[in-house]
Image: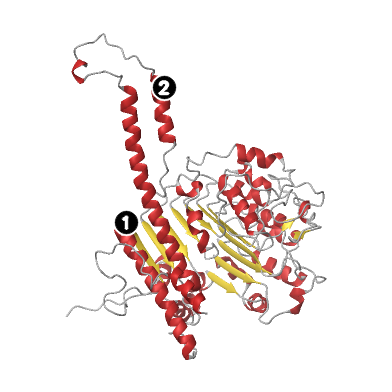
């Protein structure tokens, strides 16, 4: 028998110990750290790598119990300054935005986090710039930053000047997420007499060495290493979004939300303006509001003609910035996002406008290979039907485009071949010169090809559908009455049948369909919806969600 080799853990190098501990669960690492002092020191980098402080009380407990020299092991930090109970002071407009105690506690923790790479701040209001800005200048390794205002903007706003200054204080920032950031009255004085919240008296934010006093949201495109940008619940009506000189970051992912204080048409115009001047390096785009179908220039924040009446009575005085941006906008036939690969549509996009959103020239001409759509449970059937109509329109345009190209090639042969020219005279009469105008022929071809219909998403390969579970589903633990249970089962059946129709059409068109939230395998009945290989794509009257809705309304 061979002697058994004893595994000597204390003699292993520190790198090997850390490699072994990284493959263990956090509970096992915690158990290992309680063996002796040496193992405790080895386990510290893993125990404190990720720290989540969900409340202000948890922050105070962490500061009082954990030694400050352990903060250097933190790589991922998440802080929320809210309390475990609903604090009525968060709704008091006369209370300070953030108490000095909270600001001092957050600054004390961040000042010792020298190895921090990911930071998430969920606050109620704004930090004092003189307290938080010096701390952020020492966070030189942060690559991901998330800032969210949990308070009401009318009561405790978070200024865009402070958010932009914090973002530019992080030299290696690659991933930025801003939620519920309020415009500054310095950069948007026209919002003072509107229902859009606006921050006043934020001149205390010092000027930036690169930006100067122009601390506004469009300057985020000037971050040198920014790759992912997410803006949610924020007013995006700044006219400087259309400035081409701002685009210099290698942006790859762009996630745009909408503002609840302006009309949907204004949100659409703001989204279109940002997409028109977005960096061409974007590979993934997520939209909450649909871009406008008309190529008209978006309204600027100086004239809120889309959603607010003008006090002067003149609704047509639009600044020259929007006019110049519209004149310099690229042609709809040229894809504005040539590297776009993935397109996400959130449930906030109306299902009735889904086809118009996908048919936008800025998106349809891009080489998108993955289209992801998320629907609410009540809108899932209508959303699948809208996607089915869009796929049929895409297939029709693809066929018409081929036919038009064939007609264009035939016109080219007719224009380039003179009348009375015989095939056998090609090699016999070398002195023959065609008696026709070549420029006229080329103009004829250009006219025929310019009238062709552009293809919709020519590189599309994958379609992803995300349908959340219904709150009143038959599988829910809550007890439902027989009437509600029957309604829940009917809605679930409509969602499943709509998803199955979309799946059959995707298979017919050679597309891969991924459906989350609906089980397409558990089919009641014989073989499912039209469950035959020869599915023609026609929607039965009994399972068409629009017909079902009409019949339900008529019966009611």
The crowd level at tag 1 (other Cα within 10 Å; few <14, some 14-19, many 20+) is few
Q: What element carries label 1?
A: helix
Q: Which residue is drawn at 43% across and 80% down?
A: 490
Callout count: 2
Residue at position x 34%, y 46% from top? 399
Near-viewer residue (66 or 134):
134
> Are dots 2 and 1 in contact, CB under 8 Å?
no
Q: Picture coordinates of residue 482 (x, y %)?
A: 46, 90
Answer with the quarter of the image where residue 86 lies.
bottom right
Answer left or right for 113 relative to 96.
left
* Residue drawn 54% across the image and 39% down it: 330
Q: Is residue 508 left or right of residue 310?
A: left
Q: Position of residue 511 (x, y in %)?
A: 33, 57
| Residue 277 picture quarter | top right
Residue 540: which quarter of the image?
A: bottom left
Vertical comparison of 516 with 434: above or below: below
The numbered mark at residue 440 is 2
Residue 459 shows up from this direction: no
Q: Residue 26 or 97: which is nearer the viewer? A: 97
246 to the left or right of 47: right
Mark 1 — residue?
A: 509
Distance between the alpha carbons at the discs numbered 2 and 1: 40 Å
Q: Residue furthest top?
A: 431
The label number, if any, that marks residue 45 in the structure image: none
Question: Residue most toward the front?
Answer: 554
Say if residue 270 shows up in the picture.
yes
For the N terminus, give its image quadrant. bottom left
Q: Where is residue 403 in the image (x, y as percent from the top left)?
A: 33, 41
């Amino acid at each position: 028998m061979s002697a058994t080799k004893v595994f000597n853990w204390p003699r292993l190098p520190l790198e090997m110990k850390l490699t072994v501990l990284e493959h263990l669960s956090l509970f096992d690492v915690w158990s290992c750290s309680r063996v002796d002092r040496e193992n405790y020191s080895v386990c510290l980098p893993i125990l404190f790598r990720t720290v989540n402080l969900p409340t202000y009380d948890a922050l105070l407990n962490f500061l009082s119990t954990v030694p400050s020299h352990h903060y250097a092991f933190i790589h991922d930090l998440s802080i929320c300054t809210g309390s475990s109970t609903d604090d009525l002071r968060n709704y008091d407009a006369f209370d300070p935005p953030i108490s000095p105690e909270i600001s001092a506690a957050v600054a004390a923790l961040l000042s010792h986090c020298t190895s921090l790479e990911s930071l998430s701040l969920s606050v109620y209001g704004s930090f004092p710039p003189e307290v938080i800005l010096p701390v952020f200048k020492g966070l030189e390794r942060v690559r991901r930053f998330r800032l969210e205002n949990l308070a009401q903007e009318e009561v405790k706003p978070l200024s865009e000047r402070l958010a932009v200054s914090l973002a530019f204080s992080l030299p290696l920032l690659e991933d930025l997420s801003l939620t519920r950031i309020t415009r500054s009255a310095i950069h948007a004085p026209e919002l003072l007499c509107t229902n859009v919240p606006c921050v006043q008296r934020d001149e205390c934010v010092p000027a930036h060495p690169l930006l100067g006093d122009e601390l506004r949201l469009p300057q985020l495109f000037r971050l040198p290493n920014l790759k992912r940008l997410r803006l949610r619940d924020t007013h995006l009506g700044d006219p400087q979004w259309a400035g081409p000189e701002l685009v210099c970051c290698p942006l790859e992912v762009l996630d745009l939300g909408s503002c609840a204080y302006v009309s949907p048409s204004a949100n659409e115009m703001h989204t279109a303006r940002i997409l028109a001047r977005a960096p061409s390096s974007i590979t993934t785009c997520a939209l909450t509001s649909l871009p406008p179908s008309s190529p008209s220039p978006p309204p600027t924040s100086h004239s809120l003609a889309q959603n607010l009446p003008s006090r002067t009575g003149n609704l047509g005085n639009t600044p020259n910035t929007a006019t110049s941006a519209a004149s310099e906008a690229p042609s709809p036939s040229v894809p504005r996002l040539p590297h776009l690969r993935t397109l996400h549509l959130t449930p906030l996009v109306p299902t009735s406008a889904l086809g118009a959103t996908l048919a936008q020239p800025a998106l349809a001409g891009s080489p998108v290979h993955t289209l992801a759509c998320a629907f609410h449970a009540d809108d899932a059937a209508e959303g699948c039907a809208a996607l089915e109509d869009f796929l049929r329109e895409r297939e029709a345009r693809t066929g018409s485009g081929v036919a038009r190209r064939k007609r264009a090639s035939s016109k080219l042969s007719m224009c380039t071949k003179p009348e009375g020219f015989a095939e056998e005279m090609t090699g016999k009469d070398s002195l023959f010169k065609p008696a026709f105008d070549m420029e006229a022929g080329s103009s004829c071809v250009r006219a025929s090809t310019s009238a062709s219909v552009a293809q919709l998403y020519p590189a599309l390969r994958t379609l992803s559908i995300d349908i959340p579970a219904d709150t009143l589903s038959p599988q829910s633990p809550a007890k439902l009455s027989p009437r509600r249970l029957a309604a829940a089962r009917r809605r679930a059946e409509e969602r499943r049948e709509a998803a199955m129709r979309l799946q059959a059409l995707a298979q017919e068109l050679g597309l891969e369909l991924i459906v989350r939230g609906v089980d397409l395998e558990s089919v009641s009945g014989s073989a499912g919806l039209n469950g035959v290989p020869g599915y023609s794509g026609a929607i039965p009257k009994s399972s068409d969600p629009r017909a079902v809705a009409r019949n339900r309304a008529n019966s009611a």
